[in-house]
Image (tube, rainbow, N blue to C red):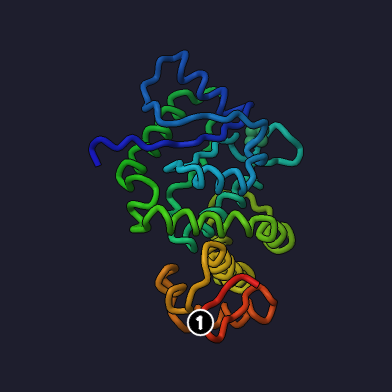
Amino acid sequence: MANFKPEILGFLCNWCSYAGADLAGVSRQQYPATMKVIRVMCSGRVDLAFVIRAFANGKDGVFVGGCWLGDCHYVTEGNYDALSMMHLGKKLLEYSGINPDRLRLEWVSASEGLRYAEVVTEFTDELMKLGPLGESEGVDQKELKLKIEAITKLIPYIKLVEREKLRVRFESKDQYEEYFNSDAVKLLIDDMIVDKLAISQIMVLLEEEALSSRDIADNLGMSSSEVSKHLSNSARQKLVKFNESERLYALA
Ligand code: FES
């Protein structure tokens, strides 16, 4: 992967990380030119949809930079929301077969030009090891596109689940880590998101053509029993219909 240069989209908070990037520049810190930057007023402004869209547009990594906890410039302390968004985003990527390390959140203050250069270098190195989006995952581009489209379609619902069930406020990064890796959150995500994500993938696949349940299983790397369960649920909700004579499923 010697010649691979990852493409990163970075969302930097205006007050800390963006100023840190500026300082890295004027201090002539050396770091790879792998990141295109979008300035946002607060890391809490970075919507899950922005992250997924960046991957849909072929970015190999997404970076979110914000103020250190306790230093956010807004009373709403958006960097705590950024932490939740990052954990949920990583879970969604994981469930869709995309390496969650491709999404990274870091705190960089306005005085930390050197730290900015270091985290960008580190993230670039990590992505170089992973290779282009889809490669380390062993997913071809068509399958990758389908999986990302399936998440995109589900984002309004996922944001609702996040707002109703996963909106938490802890003091430290470790506590967020612990909470999002807990059995309770895993159960909740399995219960409320994973099946819907699988159905969304089936819907996206059937948008192209009618398929047998075996073809759906092969295309999505799911077991036949999983596909049958999702198809019968979808048929009950009148999302898909079954053509008896051709033995194919299509969108209803
Ligand atoms: S203003 Fe920087 S993270 Fe909120």
Quarter of the image holding residue 121?
A: top left
Residue 17: x and y in percent read 55, 29
Q: What element carries label 1?
A: loop
Quarter of the image holding residue 110?
A: top right
Instruction: Say left or right for 49 vs 29.
Output: right
Type of amino acid under label 1: Glu
Q: Give the residue displayed 62% in from the left and 38% down from the top.
A: 43
* Residue 167 in view (yes/no): no
Q: Give the residue displayed 56% in from the left and 86% down from the top.
A: 244
Residue underneath mark 1: 246
Residue 206: x and y in percent read 54, 67
* Residue 132 in view (yes/no): yes
* Quadrant of picture, ligand 1: top right
Location of residue 104 with respect to 24 vertically, above or below: below
Residue 140: x and y in percent read 37, 56
Q: Give the residue displayed 61% in from the left and 49% down from the top.
A: 48
Q: Give the residue displayed 25% in from the left and 42% down from the top.
A: 1
**Residue situated furthest right in the rendering:** 75
**Residue situated furthest front in the rendering:** 245
Quadrant occupied by the C terminus:
bottom right
Quarter of the image holding residue 42?
A: top right
Residue 242: x and y in percent read 58, 81
Nearest the viewer among 34 and 141 is 141
